[in-house]
């Protein structure tokens, strides 16, 4: 999967990843103010279906939408794109950058390493 989401598409996907299945109306209720128009969300959902991020099933007279790609898969792909685009494919360089820019202390790093070692 090499398709990237726009900010609006990603916002819709975040809702679908949380709800797992939803109508356009219910997606809108989960979005922050100002709420987008129904037609706007419906158009974004159709684009997400074209990109094969979202599927649907008939529910009464409408549709329920659900993610076809899980959040972890998309997150991993996005991080690899970031790493390859800005850090010459080096995970070490990317982590070093985030540690320096976010002024992490040694305790935070040790905590992260413990979590990584658990897995």
Image (cartoon, rainbow, N blue to C red):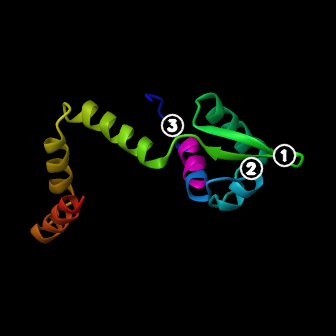
Please report whichever mark, 3 or 2, sits nearer to the chain's N-terminal start.
3
Q: Which stretch appears magenta?
A: 8-15
Residue 105 vertical placement versus 81 (above, below): below
Q: How far apart are marks 3 and 2 (CA)?
A: 18 Å
| Residue positioned 13% across, 71% down in the render | 107
Q: Residue 62: which disc?
A: 1
Looking at the image, residue 89 sits to the left or right of residue 22; the answer is left
| Identity of the residue drawn at 45% across and 29% down | 1
Q: Residue furthest front?
A: 119
Q: Mark 2 points at which residue?
A: 24
The numbered dot on residue 5 is: 3
Q: Do the residues labelled 2 and 1 touch (CB within 8 Å)?
A: yes
Name which of mark 2 and mark 1 comes first in the sequence: 2
What secondary structure is found at the residue carrying circle 2? Answer: helix
* Number of disc labels: 3
Residue 81 pos. (x, y %): 33, 34
Residue at 14 percent of width and 49 percent of height: 96
Q: In this view, does 104 lie to the left or right of 22?
A: left
User: What secondary structure do most residues of the magenta stretch adopt?
Assistant: helix
């Amino acid at each position: 999967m090499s398709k990237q989401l726009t900010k609006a598409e990603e916002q819709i996907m975040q809702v679908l990843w949380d709800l797992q299945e939803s109508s356009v109306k219910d997606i809108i209720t989960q979005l922050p103010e100002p709420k987008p128009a129904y037609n706007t969300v419906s158009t974004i959902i159709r684009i997400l279906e074209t990109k094969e991020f979202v599927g649907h099933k008939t529910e009464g007279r409408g549709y329920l939408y659900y993610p076809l790609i899980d959040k972890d898969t998309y997150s991993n792909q996005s991080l690899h794109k970031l790493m390859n685009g800005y850090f010459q494919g080096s995970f070490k360089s990317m982590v070093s950058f985030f540690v320096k820019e976010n002024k992490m202390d040694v305790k935070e790093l040790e905590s992260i390493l413990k979590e990584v070692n658990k897995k």
